[in-house]
Image (cartoon, rainbow, N blue to C red):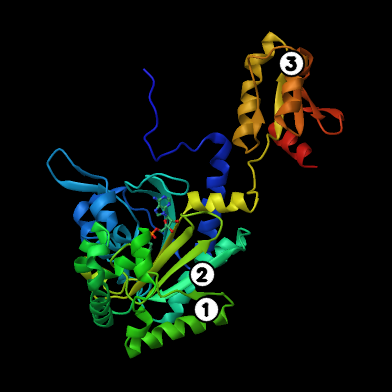
């Protein structure tokens, strides 16, 4: 019987694992420098957490959530995103007890029953941060900066930061009414999803990908014209902070975001050249979410991006990530007696941190030296019966061909290889 991997998922093979490790390490460092600490939450949560936070009518909940019942009939879901679980943990663990500001980052797989295509998978790997504890527009800019500057640091230049304000619940209710009024005459011509959206979440009409619906979007009212004074002021302060940070942005009033928890700032970082899935990062403010899922009324903002799209963008720009190290040494072992006796020395070299390749299936000196050369190792450590008797090894520099005899001692060997 042969089994295939589930559609929309992929294996990270050894030849690619270093890229993932590099991005994980690099993101961890960047987030840490901005004062964020790592949090890891479970891969599944009670389904209601996502229904309440992402919104019952959102695509994520309606169409994309992997829902299941456990043996006691409880409803769970594989997490489709990281924000709600982080906020759940924040509330449950009283993470605000040490400081009024909580700065968290996370890395891990998310699951959405999406239509798989380049840059869109059913299991994908997100990196993200959540800042909980202040409505100061400085933090909107800081959160955007972590994403933008990190992508820049990786070498991506063709980035477009698009920002918008979706307003507070008060002004967005007025905007929703204006949208309903605008779209109602077109009702018979809207796609079936948009007909539903018009009542449940009119803003999602602006995000519809059906060509006939896109047509009507052109003259739709703009959110910017419906912001109340405090929301306008907040948005303009975010823009000032971004300017002061030299982070270029364009204002795009059509950014609606697919999850319902957003208030005020919403943003995306777009990389042109990835086709339809060109949004590397998405995020925004969610000032009502902490309270909505059982906490105090505390403002918050965050973002998340996917490694898969990021890797496609890096490939597009031919940016090489640092490949894994080649072996430091290749152990060449000749003669039956040596096979057992070199093992303590080999293990000692490896536990002291040296990458040492060794193949007990190859017996001739010639075959082992050939493997040593093709392994990319800098040194061959050659041991035969004579060396064993005198407790020495031959250290051969595979680049210069120079060979010296040294004591069979791991510290000595490592020092010699360093000099
Ligand atoms: P999101 O826009 O749904 O936001 O996803 C953020 C990013 O995750 C996208 O820009 C994309 O890079 C990646 N992504 C999403 N779905 C897929 C998929 N099916 N395959 C590959 N990559 C994907 C959120 O998830 C929010 N939790 C972001 C946030 C954090 N807002 C506030 N804090």
Q: Nearer the viewer, mark 1 or mark 3?
A: 1
**Residue 79's mark?**
none
Q: In terms of depth relative to the viewer, which is nearer, 166 or 34?
A: 166
Asked if labels 2 and 3 touch by Cβ distance under 8 angstroms, the answer is: no
Q: Tag on residue 367?
A: 3
Q: Is residue 169 above or below residue 82?
A: below
Q: Quadrant of residue 418?
A: top right
Instruction: Tell me whether the residue at label 1 lies in contact with that at label 2, contact meaning CB atoms closer than 8 angstroms.
Output: yes
Label 2 near ligand 1 (CB < 8 Å): no
Residue extending farthest to the top is 336
Q: What is the quadrant of residue 193 in the picture?
A: bottom left
Kindly identify which residue carries mark 2: 161
Whichever of labels 1 and 2 marks the residue nearer the N terminus, that label is 2
Q: Above or below — where is 267 with respect to 64?
A: below
Relative image position of residue 80 (x, y in whole percent): 32, 52
Q: How many numbered marks appear?
A: 3
For the residues labelled 1 and 3, the Cα–Cα distance comes to 60 Å
Res. 213 visible in picture: yes
Which numbered disc covers residue 242?
1
Which quarter of the rendered picture does the C terminus lie within?
Answer: top right
Q: Tell me: 102 left or right of 340.
A: left
The residue at 22%/63% (across/down) is 195
Where disc 3 sits, the SS reads helix
Determine the residue positioned at 41% across, 39% down.
9
Q: Secondary structure at mark 1?
A: helix
Q: Residue at x 34, y 69 (%)?
A: 216
Percent x, y of residue 100: 34, 76
Q: Quadrant of the N terminus?
A: top left
Tag 1 near tag 3, CB within 8 Å: no
């Amino acid at each position: 019987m042969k089994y295939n991997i589930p559609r929309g998922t992929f294996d990270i093979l050894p030849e690619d694992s270093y890229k993932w490790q590099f991005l994980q390490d690099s993101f961890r460092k960047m987030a840490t420098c901005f004062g964020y600490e790592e949090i890891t939450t479970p891969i599944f949560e009670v389904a209601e957490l996502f229904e309440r936070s992402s919104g019952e009518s959102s695509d994520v909940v309606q169409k994309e959530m992997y829902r299941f019942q456990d043996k006691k009939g409880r409803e769970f879901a594989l997490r489709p995103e990281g924000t709600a679980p982080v906020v759940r943990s924040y509330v449950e663990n009283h993470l605000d007890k040490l400081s009024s500001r909580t700065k968290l980052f996370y890395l891990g797989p998310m699951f959405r029953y999406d239509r798989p295509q380049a840059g869109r998978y059913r299991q994908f790997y997100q990196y993200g941060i959540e800042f909980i504890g202040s409505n100061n527009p400085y933090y909107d800019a800081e959160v955007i900066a972590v994403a933008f500057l990190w992508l820049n640091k990786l070498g991506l230049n063709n980035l477009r930061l698009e920002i918008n304000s979706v307003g507070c619940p008060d002004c967005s209710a007025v905007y929703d009414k204006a949208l309903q009024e605008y779209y109602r005459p077109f009702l018979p011509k809207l796609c079936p999803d948009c007909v539903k959206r018009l009542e449940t979440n009119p803003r999602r009409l602006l995000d519809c990908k059906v060509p006939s619906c896109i047509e009507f979007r052109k003259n739709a009212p703009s959110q910017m014209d419906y912001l109340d004074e405090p929301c306008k002021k907040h948005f303009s302060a975010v823009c000032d902070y971004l300017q002061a940070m030299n982070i270029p942005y364009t204002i795009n009033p059509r950014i609606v975001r697919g999850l319902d928890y957003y208030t005020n700032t919403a943003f995306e970082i777009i990389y042109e050249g990835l086709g339809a899935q060109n949004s590397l990062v998405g995020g925004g403010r969610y000032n009502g979410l902490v309270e909505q899922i059982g906490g105090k009324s505390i403002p918050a903002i965050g973002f998340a991006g996917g490694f898969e799209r990021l890797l496609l963008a890096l490939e597009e720009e031919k940016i090489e990530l640092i490949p894994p190290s080649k072996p430091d040494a290749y152990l060449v072992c000749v003669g039956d007696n040596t096979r057992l006796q070199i093992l303590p020395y080999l293990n000692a070299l490896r536990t002291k941190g040296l990458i040492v390749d060794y193949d007990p299936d190859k017996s001739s000196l010639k075959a082992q030296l050939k493997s040593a050369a093709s392994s990319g190792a800098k040194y061959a450590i050659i041991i035969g019966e004579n060396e064993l008797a005198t407790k020495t090894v031959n250290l051969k520099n595979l680049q210069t061909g120079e060979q010296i005899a040294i004591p069979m001692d791991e510290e000595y060997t490592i020092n010699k290889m360093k000099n």
